[in-house]
Amino acid sequence: MKNNYRDLPPRWDKTNNLVYFSYLLVLLFFIWSSKQVGLSPLELLKGVPYMIRLLSEMLPPNFSRIFPLLKSILETLQIAFVGTFVGILGGFSLAIFAAKELSPIPKLYKISRGLIAFFRTIPDLIWAIFFVATIGLGTSAGTLTIIVDTIGFSGRFFAEAMEEIEKKPQKALEAIGISKIAIIFCAVLPEVLPSFINTSLFSLEKAVRSSVVLGLVGAGGIGIELKVAMEMFNYDQASTILILIFILVIIVEQLSVNIRNKYINN
């Protein structure tokens, strides 16, 4: 029996010339951009000996200041945890008004969306520099940075999760005169809780990594120790700091995975 290849569905959808032209433009832009940014395998190969020398100077790690470093790594975790917790509360509060059909005050919908977009658009390092310049060096600046960044990150996903759920239960409750706030807490929140937990855990993971970098601009945490070690050419001590950062990130991510498996995936 012969196969009739004419009856088989096409592997690719047919596209017009404009789409092919768009693909060509993207490819050309990539090639041009690669040249502009100086991405060169040859330059990378030239840098390999210097990388090897730097790695040799980082080994073995220097654990002579392990206790001050552990204090700084704990400070980093505290910045991330407090900032994430407060940021999630702020993100949820804004998300209530940023969910179009659920907003108790429709006039605040665009304002809430705008604030979430504004907080999310500005990089956390810029927020850190702003808070360091206004309230001074230290953990307060770092914590405020994580709060603002988390509001923007979690607020968007919270609002979208509330907008995407089934609308029939909400309309049924509206028909009997239930307020929108009551609908959110009684009908919407239980439905989106797994998504909220997932977003909150990702926010914490993101905050831990961000809080390490924030120390480089004086916003507290282990980043300050890393910056000083690199500037003083204490590469063996820098490797100790990197090991501690790696352990912290792995512990937080593993806890996040365990919580996600227990409360979401089951």
Image: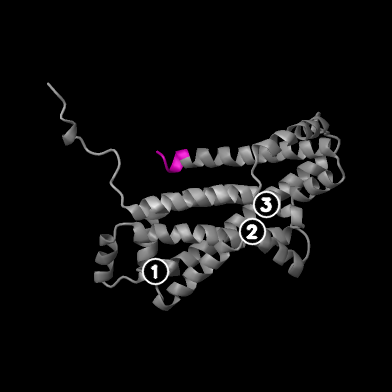
Seen in the image, is 135 located left or right of residue 1? right
Give the class, few, some or many, for how many residues have Cα within 10 Å of label 2's Cα (few <14, many ≥20). Answer: many
What number of labels is visible?
3
Residue 211 got which mark?
3
Residue 147 got which mark?
none
Seen in the image, is 144 located left or right of residue 61? left
| Contact? badges 2 and 3 (CB < 8 Å) | no
Question: In the displayed structure, would residue 251 be above or below residue 154?
Answer: above
Task: Specify whether residue 264 is painted magenta.
Answer: yes
Look at the numbered disc 2 and give the secondary structure of its residue: helix
Q: Which residues are magenta?
A: 261-266
Q: Can residue 208 be seen by looking at this rendering? A: no
Residue 36 position in % (x across, y down): 63, 51
Q: Residue at x 68, y 54 (%)?
A: 79
| Contact? badges 1 and 3 (CB < 8 Å) | no
Which residue has dot 2 on it? 124
Which quadrant of the rendered structure holds the N terminus?
top left
Residue 124 position in % (x across, y down): 64, 59
Which residue has dot 1 on it? 181
